[in-house]
Image (tube, rainbow, N blue to C red):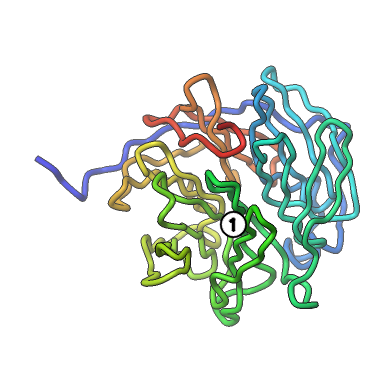
Amino acid sequence: MFNPFSQPSLIKAEVFASLPAKYRNLGTTDWSNPNRQGAKVEQFLEGPSFDRNGNLYVTDIPFGRIFKIDTSGNWDLVCEYDGWPNGLKFHKDGRAFIACYKQGLMVLDVNTGKIEPIIETMYSEGFKGLNDLHFNNEGDLFFTDQGQTGIIDWSGRVFKYSKDGELQRLVTNAPSPNGITLNNAENQVYVAVTRSQQIWRLPLMKDKSISKSGVAIQLSGGHAGPDGIEMDSEDGLIVCHLGVGVWRFDNNCLPTHLVYTDEHSLMTNIAFGGPERKTLYITDSMNGRIMRAEMPVAGKVLYGLS
């Protein structure tokens, strides 16, 4: 008999790779001072995304770095620049698009390490601080503009940047929009709204506008709220919940699984990998590690790998 209150199954994550000592920079930056309350950091890993060869790319926000991790767990520095890179997603043509908190929407040639801005402003105004991004199957890019917004500042934004170069504001009142993804039918946008501990669902109308948006999931507990999110092939939503673990919710937004670790970790963002796309790779940001866990359902096929 169907029971909507079944106990979620537990999945233990293991360490896949750790940032080598030669890349660890203990110190403070203009990003870490406000975002880590002045504490010294060695790194803050984010934005995991796979290329077609199975290499995993991650960002390091405070020190403006992009790393490539091969299938054996070896790290290479691809790019270092004057920015705070957060979310990263691959375009079908092989370019990596980056949501940069400092400079706006960037694009990286992973073969040469050249990085340059695509969008730095909108209507002559700068962004608050971009966080994450996601391509639909047509090549349109959805991204979040989080900045320092929160429960007393409901001015975080969500944008759509079309494949034709048109920039459209979809949301202007989110208290800390963070991770973003779409369902498999691509008629719903999901946004992790960190400071209100919510996942918002934004239905896309036939004319591509947003209507009847609402709260799909209400969370509680942890250190802040939801961070990175992704969809699996059955429209199960995978949610990084800071200080708790990584949830899987089914297509009715009911919890089915929880990924956890035995020790303190800050699991912030995710990417499906492996030969069957069932291995979930997770950034443990503060510890400089990549965790992984075997999931019951494969991740959806992303635009950059389609």
Q: Quadrant of residue 22?
A: top right
Q: Position of residue 69 (x, y in %)?
A: 73, 27
Residue at image point 41% right, 57% down? 188
| Residue type, label 1 | Phe
Direction from residue 30 to residue 142 in the image, left or right: left
Frontmost residue, 45 versus 163: 163
Q: Which residue is mark 1?
A: 142
Q: Is residue 268 visible?
A: no
With respect to residue 213, does 257 lie above or below? above
With respect to residue 110, does 170 lie above or below? below
Q: Position of residue 270 (x, y in %)?
A: 56, 41
With respect to residue 94, does 268 lie above or below? below
> Which secondary structure lies at badge 1?
strand
Residue at image point 84% right, 49% down? 64
Instruction: Identify the residue at the far left of this view.
Output: 1
Q: Quadrant of the N terminus?
A: top left
Q: Position of residue 280 (x, y in %)?
A: 52, 33
Q: Position of residue 70 (x, y in %)?
A: 72, 22
Q: Quadrant of residue 187?
A: bottom left
With respect to residue 13, does 25 lie above or below? below
Residue at image point 40% right, 36% down? 233
Q: Is residue 45 visible?
A: yes
Q: Quadrant of residue 124?
A: bottom right
Residue at image point 73% right, 61% down? 36
Label 1 Cα neighbours within 10 Å, binned few <14 / some 14-19 / many ≥20: many
